[in-house]
Amino acid sequence: MKPWIKKTLMGLFGASIAVGGLTACSSSHHHRGPMSAEKMSEVRGKVVERVSSKLNLNDAQKQKLNALADKMEAQRTAFMGKATDPRAEMQAIVSGDKFDRARAQTLLEEKTRAVRTNSPEVINALADFYDSLNSEQQQKVRDLMQRRKGWTGRV
């Protein structure tokens, strides 16, 4: 087999793996697609309650945690954009006989813009929450983050 054919086939194989990985990761909840607003609210409530419980937060700290959750939810919504099916976006990029580079670049720019625009608010909300914790709570956050699953994962 000629070297350029091997390289082409390997490139296509690698691209298909990359697209498959991106498609699989693009859905928020296994293969069922993005979470509905109701499911997102339910998960958010559980996470906020769990963090509040683990850190023994007072009411002011819970308010800051909820503000952080609001900002993160707004970031997620902006990142997801108007598309309801990220998998369909990726499929559309590879639907033709050639990879739609312009559409892929536009998609990347939209996602990057959403992250860049909303990140300062998320960082400020996270900083406000973290700074409201006492030194014992801050140490607990650092300890929990050292674990493999992060501070919201099961311990």
Image (cartoon, helix red, strand yellow):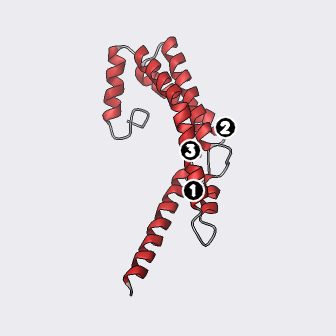
Between residues 90 and 138, which one lies in front from this camera angle?
Answer: 90
Residue 104 drawn at (x, y percent):
57, 56
Q: Farthest front residue?
A: 102
Q: Can residue 29 be seen in this view?
A: no
Tell me the number on the disc at residue 113: none
- The residue pinned by badge 1 equals 104
Closer to the N terminus: mark 2 or mark 3? 2
Q: How far apart are marks 3 and 1 (CA)?
A: 11 Å
- The residue pinned by badge 3 equals 111
Q: Can residue 71 be seen in this view?
A: yes
Q: Which amino acid does label 1 sit on?
A: Ala
User: In this rendering, is residue 107 above or below 144?
Assistant: below
Closer to the N terminus: mark 3 or mark 1? 1
Residue 131 drawn at (x, y percent):
41, 16
Seen at 45% across and 16% down, the residue is 57
Q: What residue type is labelled 3?
A: Lys
Q: How far apart are marks 1 and 2 (CA)?
A: 27 Å
The kind of secondary structure element at disc 3 is helix
